[in-house]
Image (spheres, rainbow, N blue to C red):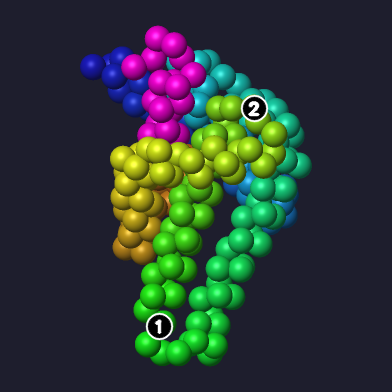
């Protein structure tokens, strides 16, 4: 019983510590430049946990990944920001430049594309944490996972929706969970897939 309580307390400590470290490095990058490398570093540390490496110096490990991925992750961040902006512009212009009877069809196309881009963006963190590719190849692999692993995509969508609802309905619980638990669930969903396709003995 005492051992279980210790493990639970240790797990809570790890998640809280990761939340604080992520926030620190997010702010160090002035928000806009800190978000992507801090989040990739977060997923990378969580990947180490999933691999069974529990005795990590969190700050040192986090800082290592933050530095290593700062430039590359921000290049990808810039690409996604441009894509999301283009989606927003197209959505805004539909009612001004197209006949009303085709609005619904255009909105379906735009929302479908936006959903694919969003899930690709969600996958990019797990992919960057696990693989070493050329910068643009991360987008290709992350997008491929959206279509090749539909069950994973569905589970991620459910978790995103639950997390969003939690943010709207229970601020206290949302803050307590933080981004570390959010990332842990997403990384856990993709990790088995990575192992299956990279480990000959993976099942």
- Taking the view exactly as shown, the residue that stands out farthest to the left is 1
Residue 73 inside the magenta-drawn segment: no
- SS under mark 1: helix
- Tell me if residue 194 is in the magenta stretch: yes
Residue at 57% from the left image edge and 31% from the top image edge = 129
Whether 30 is drawn above or below 103: the answer is: above
203 to 154, vertically: above or below: above
Camera-nearest residue between 78 and 160: 78
For label 2, the SS is: loop
Q: Are marks 1 and 2 in contact (CB under 8 Å)?
A: no
Identify the residue at horizontal 48%, vertical 41% (top origin). Answer: 144
Residue 181 in view, yes or no: no
> From the viewer's perspective, is 177 left or right of 117?
left
Which callout, 1 or 2, points at the residue further toward the start of the chain? 1
Circle 2 sits on which residue?
A: 132
| Quarter in which the C terminus is drawn | top left
Q: Is residue 15 left or right of residue 153?
A: right
Task: Name the side, left or right, on which 125 lies relative to 76.
Answer: left
Is most of the magenta stretch helix, strand or loop? helix
Label 1 Cα crowd, 10 Å radius (few <14 / some 14-19 / many 20+): few
In-front residue for pair 71/203: 203
Check the image and report above or below for 44 versus 77.
above
From the top left corner, tell me how far across and down residue 190 is, in percent: 42, 33
- The magenta segment is 186-203
Distance Cα–Cα, label 1 vs label 2? 43 Å
Q: Which mark is residue 102?
A: 1
Residue 143 in the image, given as x and y percentages of width and height: 51, 45
């Amino acid at each position: 019983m005492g051992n279980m309580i210790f493990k639970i307390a240790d797990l809570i400590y790890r998640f809280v510590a990761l939340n604080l470290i992520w926030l620190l490095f997010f702010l160090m990058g002035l928000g806009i430049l800190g978000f992507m490398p801090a989040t990739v570093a977060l997923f990378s540390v969580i990947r180490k946990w999933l691999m069974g490496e529990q005795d990590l110096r969190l700050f040192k490990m986090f800082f290592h990944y933050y530095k290593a991925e700062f430039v590359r992750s921000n290049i990808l961040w810039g690409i996604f920001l441009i894509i999301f902006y283009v989606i927003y512009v197209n959505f805004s212009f539909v009612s001004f430049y197209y006949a009303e009877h085709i609005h619904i069809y255009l909105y379906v196309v735009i929302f479908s594309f936006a959903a694919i881009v969003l899930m690709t963006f969600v996958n990019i963190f797990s992919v960057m944490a696990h693989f070493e590719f050329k910068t643009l190849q991360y987008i290709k692999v992350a997008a491929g996972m959206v279509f090749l692993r539909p069950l994973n995509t569905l589970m991620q969508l459910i978790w995103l929706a639950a997390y969003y609802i939690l943010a709207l309905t229970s601020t206290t619980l949302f803050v307590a969970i933080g981004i570390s638990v959010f990332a842990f669930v997403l990384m856990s969903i993709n990790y088995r897939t990575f192992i299956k396709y990279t480990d000959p003995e993976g099942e």
